[in-house]
Image: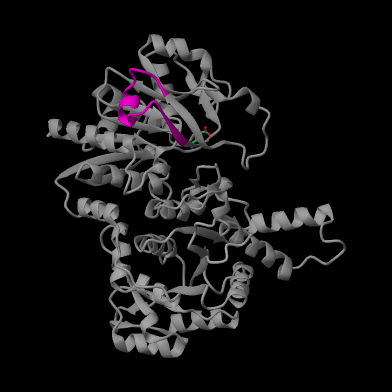
Amino acid sequence: MKNQKVKYIFVSGGVCSSLGKGISTASLGLLLEGHGYKISIIKMDPYINIDPGTMSPFQHGEVYVTEDGAETDLDLGYYERFTEANLSRKNSVSTGQIYNTVIQRERRGDYLGRTVQVIPHITNEIKKRIFDVATDDMLDFVLVEIGGTVGDIESVPFLESIRQIRQELGHSRVMNIHLTLIPTISVAGEQKTKPTQHSVKELMELGIYPDMLLCRTATNLSDEMKSKIALFCNVTEQNVISALDINGSIYEIPYMLHLNRFDEIVLKHFGLEITPLKLPRWDKFIKAIRNPRKKVTIGVVGKYTTLQDAYRSLYEALVHGAAANEAEIEIVRIESDKILSGKNINVRSVLKDVDGILVPGGFGDRGIDGKIEAIRYARKEKIPFFGICLGLHCAVIEFGRNVCGLEDANSTEFNPTAGHPVISLLEEQEIIFDKGGTMRLGAFRCDFNEGSYIRKIYNSAFAMERHRHRFEFTMKYRDTYLNNGMVFGGIHAETELVETIELHDHPWFIATQFHPEFKSRPTAPHPLFRDFIKASIEYGSKKR
Ligand code: GLN
């Protein structure tokens, strides 16, 4: 059943990528919530992969995991961090999924001899996915971000689908927002509208008439510029607004857009009352990041540290944790390749200025030695250490080799014939050959043992946390590790799998098999990140 009142807002992007469509869409979601509405957000990705699960971080950035275990685009991370929306696999749609469904239907014979075509079969499936999210009766708005740039061949079926939805439901239930770029030519110091004109022209050729243009620009658009853009693009002048480049935090963007009347224009479009914006929890967070009283430096020892987005949720969770401690955070990204195994001097020189060390998740054996070396250093020097997923694997290997005397302790991911495979695949997974969607994915319950530090940090006996991995701690080594002082703080009760480890002769040494960063929000910082930053601040203040 279609929800008869829900309104749809489609956000497309023009001129080029990386203009901040995801953050703008997430910001609009937050602003609408601030006016008392309930929203959901869908990301439509034009690639033919079913999901980004099999894509390299060099190609795609982070793979964001939802509670129900979907491997999705990192924009879903922004949506969840900015808004209250609970997202699931329904909120992440790719061309690959659409075609997969239609082709399966064709093989089953569901089309009864008809020719299967982009219009109507592919577009109907796209529309169905959008309407499926809207079945929740509580929803007031469904925001749909169309990935890619208008003019790309791949996004045409998505744009055709939203054209049809506007045609079916009309102006009063559908709004089209187009995010575009107004570049400034530096020598002339002039803002240029031509790329925007061309982009809107392309949209119009597809039958889509934008109701609002959100213009990414270095300086606010003058009234004269706005009227020029309005004239050429067939949009009312009031509905051409600036999306300014921001120097500071991305969390400043919603208010910047609010000041430019982003939410007001949307409410007006739908004939809704312009109510005052109320975001008390967001305001508290903004106040904290604007007025830090302390400083903390965290070293992230990973292997995709040169990329902006490969550890996006992790960096954001660190920012939330710092804000919860009224601290400004400096994140030092360290390529683990640079830390050479066994060379104590080198690891010290690389990590000497950090107050805490975090080893994040990852795949494959490149850079593993450097991570293990960084963990050894953190353990010995009693520097706060936080390991996530692969970070837990590395911590287990390090402890096995250097404390338990298991010299060739390793993960079978890095050495399938390791003498001591302290991290390995679950038995039943050893026969899995497909790489797509074969991991332990999504939320599982973790029970915290009495007396564990982690139970105190969560202030709870259990938590639901999100996973994305294939390898696990190997149970037969449990007693060896216990006898040498490792504490298994969190366990997945049904399978007895190790979920978290900790050391008690150390101020803060915790690693988790799950990814807590996916659940941290600015308005609800994750307890592990909050506590890790707290311990790091304490360590830093003693060091100085
Ligand atoms: N590569 C490891 C595994 O598959 C860890 C994955 C991760 O860090 N997300 O188990």
- The reply, left or right, for residue 165 in relation to residue 42 is right
Q: Is residue 456 magenta?
A: yes
Question: Does residue 22 appear to the left or right of 256 in the view shown?
Answer: right
Residue 470 x/y as whole percent:
56, 32
The image position of residue 153, as x and y in percent, is 61, 70
Regarding residue 15, the answer to whether it shows in the image is no
**Residue occupying the point 84% across, 66% down:** 114
Placement of the C terminus among the 4 image quadrants = top left
| Residue 135 to residue 348: above or below | below
Position above or below: 264 against 317: below
Q: How many marks?
A: 0
Foreground: 353 or 323? 323
Which image quarter holds the N terminus? bottom right
Picture quarter containing residue 336? Answer: top left
* Quadrant of the rendered image containing residue 335: top left
Residue at 28% from the left image edge and 42% from the top image edge: 321
Does the image show residue 69? yes
Q: Position of residue 117 (x, y in %)?
A: 76, 68
Residue at x-position 65% and y-position 56%: 96
Q: Picture coordinates of residue 310 (x, y %)?
A: 43, 48
With 477 as the anchor, is 522 left or right in this view? left
Magenta run includes residue 539: no
Give the magenta range.
448-465
- The colour scheme used here is one colour
Residue at the spot x=76%, y=53% of the render? 104
Relative to 286, say whether 387 is above or below: above
Residue 440, quarter of picture? top right
